[in-house]
Image (cartoon, rainbow, N blue to C red):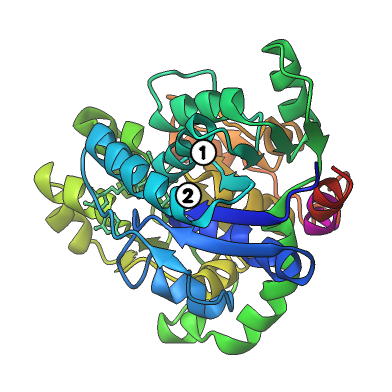
Amino acid sequence: MRPTKIISVVGARPQFVKLAPLQMELKKHLDSFVVHTGQHYDETLSDKFFEELSIPKPEYNLGVGSATHGAQTGLMLKKLEEVFDYEKPDLVLVYGDTNSTLAGALAAAKMNIRVGHIEAGLRSFVKSMPEEINRVLTDRLSDILFCPTGTAVDNLKNEGIDRGVYLVGDLMYEALEIFAPIAERRTDILRNLSLGSREYILLTIHRAENTDNHNRLRYLMEQITKLGHKIVFPVHPRAKKELKSAGLWEHLQNRDNIVLTEPVGYFENIVLIKNAYLVLTDSGGIQKEAYYFGIPTITLRNETEWPETVASGINRLLADRELLELIASEEHPNGLRSRGIEPKTSEKIINVFLNY
Ligand code: UD1
């Protein structure tokens, strides 16, 4: 049966980016509104994204904030249940792989409300990643699974999930198409940081597997500080906390070639990626955005949920290789990677709902 009332549950930075193009379209066709769990609450990680992406203020903000995984997810479950009980949606839409995703899916499924999962079927096959646990469980609980890639569809098939699966493409690509031209007009980040195009490496790290394990964090920082290039490093609050407690922060601050900044908004991030000489990241979203812009990337992990980016040659995995050698052997393919990308993702998702 076609859903008439849809609630989108979001909470963390990359979910706001996926929500923006979809919510714009959803509003035109269905009764749909947004619940923000409050997982991200800093101005730079949350408010700024809503403002830049022109997303109306969420109807609910649950103010859950930071805590251990169990406490954070548990509080979200409790509060989401109250909202769902009051609002009686007939479908709850969750995005990606954060604790907000799992909480939204679990709260809804237990109340017999249908669940739709945006970015279903992605796998790293590493169970120690909190995101992998969130993905696998959310996909099991979902009735409608929107996959960004053919690999994601195959992953679900291998787990015996083939009903309600739709290949729709990537909302982050759609967001980039809509917002990149606006970002370039509105942002002075290159001028403010005195950066020339292709003159710097963009670095981001935030994954628990890289930040919370201090041996790994120290190893990464050793690799990075061996580079003579100019490096721009917007620091996620989790990374900053761990760099400080591992005794690495001051060392970074004293390096002339490393520019440390607060986390940047969506617009600045796009401009920084598009003009970078190379991107070093452990973020799934930034890997894809760099790929769409054709900017060479080294992913600071052993695996990726986006193997297409590696197959294209534009993205390489650091694993435990020497960063300096990897960079030296870098070829520089250029140009937009729009080949094989599914266009109009939000339209496809809405058509699934309208024909359900
Ligand atoms: C979360 C997601 C991750 C996603 C990332 C995007 C989970 C398990 N992880 O990671 O998949 O890629 O968001 O950024 O859901 N903090 C602040 N201010 C905030 C939010 C967090 O200072 O607004 C600090 C707190 O010290 C907190 C830590 O960052 O303990 C981690 O925050 P959390 O939301 O648990 O996970 P992220 O690392 O942001």
Question: Residue beneath label 1, please?
Answer: 108
Q: Earlier in the sequence, mark 2 or mark 1?
A: 2
Residue extent of the magenta highlight: 344-349
Crowding near the residue tagged with mark 2, few <14, some 14–19, many ≥20 C-alpha atoms within 10 Å: some
Residue drawn 66% across the image and 56% down it: 5
Viewed as shown, does residue 317 lie left or right of 45?
A: right
Which dot marks residue 56? none
For the stretch drawn in magenta, the main secondary structure is helix
Question: Is residue 77 one of those drawn in magenta?
Answer: no
Residue drawn 27% across the image and 67% down it: 256
Q: Nearer the viewer, residue 304 or 106?
A: 106
Q: Are marks 2 and 1 in contact (CB under 8 Å)?
A: yes
- Look at the numbered disc 1 and give the secondary structure of its residue: helix
Residue drawn 64% across the image and 47% down it: 90
Inspect the image, locate mark 1, and give the three-letter code of the amino acid beneath it.
Ala
Question: Residue beneath label 2, please?
Answer: 84
Residue 144 percent coordinates (x, y): 72, 35
Viewed as shown, does residue 79 lie left or right of 90?
A: left
Residue drawn 42% across the image and 39% down it: 103
Q: Nearer the viewer, residue 202 or 200?
A: 202
Residue 246 percent coordinates (x, y): 13, 41
- Look at the numbered disc 2 and give the secondary structure of its residue: helix
Q: Is residue 134 above or below residue 148?
A: above
Q: CA distance from mark 2 to mark 1?
A: 7 Å
Residue 192 quadrant? bottom left
Question: Is residue 346 one of those drawn in magenta?
Answer: yes
